[in-house]
Amino acid sequence: MSDKFGILEAEKRGIKLGEIGQRIVLENEHVRIWEINLDPGETIDFHIHYHPYVVISLGGGENEIETIFGDLIKTVEELGSTVFINEMRAVHRLTNRAKIRYLSRLIELKSVRWTTEVKD
């Protein structure tokens, strides 16, 4: 059985997928805008994105993404940098590895929803 996005792996480990950010700043039928606000060393729990999204860095930006499969991806987001993610990625969590607070806005584009079909 193919579990490309790690949804079955998370379920097998008893991991309940969490929210993408700490709070929703704005939501309507087109977008959902999350605030992500992490102190140094703080982590957003395992989650998955079902929509394409844009991340705008408002501060900090030395982060580590850990996938459910154990892959570690380092990111550096300069103040004001903007990234568009247009592909579904595996279940992951985000940790602030900087010595300062990380703050960003993540804008989900609700008009497109990715599918997570698990194939035999």
Image (cartoon, rainbow, N blue to C red):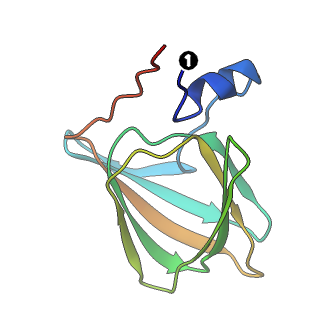
In the image, residue 19 sits, relative to residue 95, either above or below, namely above
Residue at 23% across / 40% down in the picture? 112
Please state the horizontal and vertical placement of residue 10, each as a whole percent of the image: 67, 28
- Determine crowd level at label 1: few under 14, some 14-19, many 20+ residues with C-alpha closer than 10 A: few
Going by the image, does 49 lie left or right of 68? left
Secondary element type, mark 1? loop
Furthest residue in direction bottom, as rendered: 79
Residue at 77% across / 24% down in the picture? 13
Furthest residue in direction top, as rendered: 120
* 101 or 73, nearer to the observer: 73
Query: In the rendered image, which residue does mark 1 sit on?
Result: 1
Residue 72 figure quarter: bottom right
Residue 51 figure quarter: top left
Please state the horizontal and vertical placement of residue 71, each as a whole percent of the image: 69, 53
Residue at 68% across / 41% down in the picture? 68
* 37 or 109, nearer to the observer: 109
Going by the image, does 52 lie left or right of 13? left
Position of the N terminus by quadrant = top right
Residue at 31% across / 54% down in the picture? 86
In the image, residue 99 sits, relative to residue 44, either above or below, namely below
Give the mark count: 1
Going by the image, does 71 lie left or right of 108? right
Please state the horizontal and vertical placement of residue 59, each as a whole percent of the image: 56, 80
**Type of residue at label 1?**
Met
Going by the image, does 88 lie left or right of 91? left
Please state the horizontal and vertical placement of residue 113, each as a whole percent of the image: 28, 35
* 82 or 11, nearer to the observer: 11
